[in-house]
Amino acid sequence: MLVLGLVWATGVIVLAGPVVLRNVLIFGKISPFYEFSSNYSMLWEIVREHGRIFVRELSTSELIASWVVNRGVLATGLVVVIASLLVCFYRMSFAQIRDLIKEQRYLILFISYVFANLAAVILVRAVYWMSGNLAGEAQRYFVQIYWTTWLCIALLVTSFFRINRPIYNLAKGALIIVFAMIALLQARLYNYQISLPVRDTGVSFEIGQDAAKLLATEVTDQQIVLSPRAYLLRIYLDINARKLTPRSQCDFQPCFTREDLQRSGQSGVLWGLVIDKYSLVRATAGEYGDLIRGLVTSPQDYPEFERLQINGPAMVFKYIGGTRMTSNSSP
């Protein structure tokens, strides 16, 4: 058991070690994760909410999840589990218990993995806000922790009923049927998800054809364009585009001030800014700082930039020069 634990820990260190080392050297912390604070204050509330989400994801049923987190059902389940363990271990010696643990070491490893995952998510949820879907949409049913939990349940049930052969065979048959039904349900959900139309994230949808043609024609190789989703301009238009940093990342990446933009515009390096369709709402809300929010909501206050009247979902601003101003210079 100890050897298995060491092998697992070694694998984690080999895979996660370089990432952790990079985060510590660059950001000064193991994880530079930025998110809102937790909306729960009591540990029991966190455990109960995560238990409800976990069971809902595992069973694909909100009704079953509500039953499990019910205080009465939860207390009854704990009593049954404790009573079953006491019955199993009552007449066993220490040597027999030790042999049983050795025999069921893989089951214990599975259970430890499940509880370690639960504890880690509960700990994160106690500090940060997390959504009700822990791994996206329908693909969340394929997260390995749920299949591991089902394997634990299967191993526990078969181990418990192994002493009675007829019940053991019946339990195996029931588990096979349940696994087949769950696999069919998850496969149907996954097929439904992949059959949905994929949202276009190209320049035609996010920026517009007219804006794309203008940028491809006017922006020279010696100029740059700033955009929240600069990769679209680089990939589709081969433009030297740079990302506008969100306010939440200003501690780790440079956030531009108004003076920075004016200075780069006067030097001829900055062509302008492109706020794509997806980023407009976030920019209006101030996620990219007061400078970008002001530019989007009140472009008349920034005479050094001209908003080009182009048909399309994006807002395109070209640097044309103007009076150097020091107000609204915060990122």
Image (cartoon, rainbow, N blue to C red):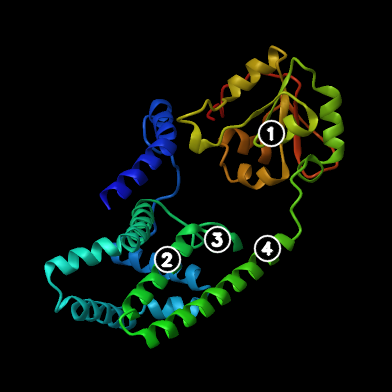
| Label 1: element kind | helix
Residue that label 1 marks? 231
The mark nearer the N terminus, 1 or 3, is 3
Residue that label 3 marks? 142
Residue 149 position (above or below residue 295): below
The mark nearer the N terminus, 2 or 4, is 2
On the question of residue 112 being in view, the answer is: yes
Q: Nearer the viewer, mark 1 or mark 2?
A: 2
Amino acid type at image mark 1: Tyr
Q: Is mark 1 in CB contact (under 8 Å) with mark 2?
A: no
- Which residue appears at 45% of the width and 69% of the height? 150
Q: Count of labels shown?
A: 4
Query: Where is residue 279 drawn, in percent x and y?
Result: 66, 43
| Label 4: element kind | helix
Badge 4 density bin: few <14, some 14–19, many ≥20, Cα 10 Å: some
| Res. 71 image quadrant | bottom left
Q: Nearer the viewer, mark 2 or mark 4?
A: 2
Residue that label 2 marks? 149
- Which residue appears at 56% of the width and 25% of the height? 257
Q: Of residues 85 and 219, which is closer to you in this image?
A: 85
**Residue at mark 1 to residue at mark 2: CA–CA distance:** 39 Å
Residue 125 position (above or below residue 302): below
Q: Is mark 2 in CB contact (under 8 Å) with mark 4?
A: no
Badge 1 density bin: few <14, some 14–19, many ≥20, Cα 10 Å: some
